[in-house]
Image (tube, helix red, strand yellow):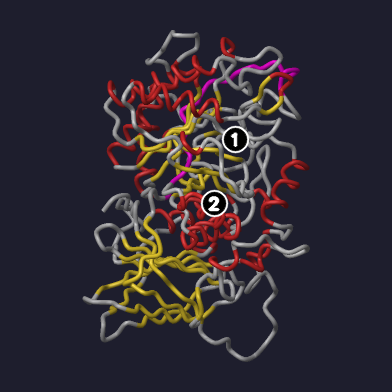
Amino acid sequence: MNKQINRRTFLKTAALAAGTAHALAFARAGRGAAAPATNTPAAAVELAVDLAVVRHHMAGGMGASWHSIAREMTFDEKLLSMDRTNKTARGSGWGANPPVADVAKWKRLEDCASWLGMDWLRVELQQCSYEPEKDRFDWANEEMQALYRILDWCERNQADVFLTQMYSNVEWNAYAGVSPVQSAPRNMDDFAVGLATLVEYLVNKKKYTCIKWICITNEPAGDWSWWLGPGRKMLSITPGLKAVRAALDQRGLRIPLSAPDWNHIGDPPAQGFDFAPYVGAYDSHDYGHANPIGMGRWVKLAHADNKPFFLSEMGNMWLGWGDSHPGPRSYAHGLSLANTVLSGLNTGVDGFNRWSFTNRGDLDGQWQLVRTWDSANKKYLDKDGIMPEPVPYYTYAMLTRFSAKHSAVLASTVSGGTWPEFEATYKRPPAAGEQWPAFEASYRGVNLVALRSPQGNLTFIVLNKAALGQELVLRLNGIGKAATLHCYQVTEAEITQPDFKLEARKTFSVSAATPVLKDNLPPASITVYSTYRLKHAEAGMTKD
C-alpha cells in the first residue's frame, strides 16, 4: 500500500468514492443509526440461503500482500512529488521480512500464513531487484531470494498469486527530474522486455505455476503516484500494458495482466478502459468503507467483458494511518474489512487482498498481520518474538481460514427480502448529500455471505456490527443430505486474551427435515458456521 498521498488529498478522494460517513458507524446498529432504547426484544434477524442458486463463482480467493522488497534506500527528496520523505517514498511495502538466511524466522512466518489459509496473495517486488541495469539481470540477491521463498510457500499451499511490480526504481529507465521510485519507464519497450524476462525466468526456469495474474505497477493514477512522466505528471498506463502484453506473448506466456490498480474504488469510466484489449482482469484498491455501489459498477464492467474484478488492496484509512498509527490493527478495522469482504462477495468481487501480511508498522501505520519488527529499536524481532498481531490476525482469519479459493457465492435473502438489492442500486450514483450507509449490504448491522467450496463444503460468515446482541435464524433452502455445521466466533474481548484459541464452540445438525439453525450473535462479532472442522493447530483451507 504505497499510500503516500497527503491526508487532504486522501479525504477528498475517499469522499468522492464512498461518501462522507465516518467508520464509527461500525459501533452502531442498522444502517449507521444508533439503536433506539427499548425494553422490547428485537425480532430475530432471519436469513435464508438458497443452496441451489449460485450468485457467482470467485475467480480468486482471499489473502494479504506479501512483499519481497527489503533494502533501505535514499532518494533525492527534491525529485519526490508532494510530501514524501525518504522513509515513506515507497509506502510501507518494504522492510518487514527477516533476512532470508534466518530460516527459523521465515518458518514462523510461513506457519502463520498457512494457519490463515490465505489462497489469493498479492506478491510484490520492484524492477531494481532483478534488473538493476539495462539487460543485466540478478537472480540471486536478497530480495530475489525472498521472492522465491514467498512463491515457494504459495506453490506448496496452492495459493494463487497476483504478481505485482510495485515500481521500477531504476535510474537507467527513469525520466529526468523524476525520482526513479516514482518514474514511469522512459523506454516502454525496455521496461516490457525486463518484466517479461522476469516472468519467463519464474515460470520456465523456476517452474512456478502459482502465478495467475500480473500487475505492471502499483497505483498509477495521480501526480503523487508511481507512474510519472516529465514534470512529475501522470502518464497513461495503456502503452505499458500494450508493450508488456506483446513481450509476454512473444515468449508464449499467457498469464493475464490486470489493471488499473487505482488507489481507491472510485468509478470506472462508463465507456470502459482503452487498455481493455491488453488485460484479462480489472482491479482497484479500497481504503474507505465497503461501498457495494462502487464495487457493483466495477463488477458489472468486468463481468460484462468476461473478466474478474479484484480488490487488490483493501483497508480502512478513516480509522487512521501513517507513521505508527494503531488504527489498522484495531478491532473496528477488522469489522470494517469483514463488511468489505462480505458486501464484495455478494456483489460479485472475485478476490480480496488485505494490506498487509508483513509490515514494519512504523512507516505508514500498523498494518501487519504478523509482528516481525521492533519499532523502538529498529531491528527484527528474534524468532520467538515473531507472532500474530492478535486482533487483525484473528478477525481476518474468520474470512480466510474457512473459505477455499474459487468458491461459489450462494444466493441469500434477509427477512424475506432481496439481499442486497445491487441490481437496482448500482445503476445510479448516490444523490446529493446521500451517504454510503444508505446502501450498506446489511440488515440491522448484520451481514452474511454463503459460500460453497469446489468440493461442496459450506461456510456461512455472519458479521454483527451492531453494539447489541441479536438472535439469528438461518434457513437453508434446498439442502439435500444432512450436514454438521461447526460454529467459530470472535469478539474483541476473546481474541485479546493471551490463551485464545480458535476452536469450534458448538455444532448444529441441518438436513432436509431440519433446515433451520437458530443462534445468538454477540455484539460486534464475527461468526462462522462451516462444514470444515478445524482444530486450532491445523492449517486453514486454501484449496479443498
Of the pair 372 and 203, the residue shown nearer to us:
203
Query: In this rendering, would 314 be left or right of 409?
Result: right
Name which residue type carries label 2.
Trp
Residue 501 in the image, given as x and y percentages of width and height:
39, 58
Of the pair 528 and 209, the residue shown nearer to us:
209
How many marks the image carries: the answer is 2
**Most extreme residue toward the left, as rendered?**
481
Of the pair 328 and 337, the residue shown nearer to us:
337
**Most extreme residue toward the front, as rendered?**
271
Judge whether residue 328 can be spotted in this image: no
Which residue is rendered at x = 57% and y = 30% of the image? 237
Where disc 2 sits, the SS reads helix
Mark 2, Cα crowd under 10 Å, few <14 / some 14-19 / many 20+, is many
Location of residue 212 with respect to 389 vertically, above or below: above
Location of residue 183 with respect to 15 vertically, above or below: above
Of the pair 519 and 413, the residue shown nearer to us:
413
Name which residue type carries label 1.
Glu
Judge whether residue 533 can be spotted in this image: yes
Location of residue 404 with respect to 518 vertically, above or below: above
Q: In the picture, which quadrant includes the N terminus?
A: top right
Q: Is residue 63 magenta?
A: yes
Query: In this rendering, would 99 be left or right of 284?
Result: left
Q: Which residues are magenta?
A: 62-80
Q: Which residue is mark 2?
A: 298
Q: Which residue is mark 1?
A: 219
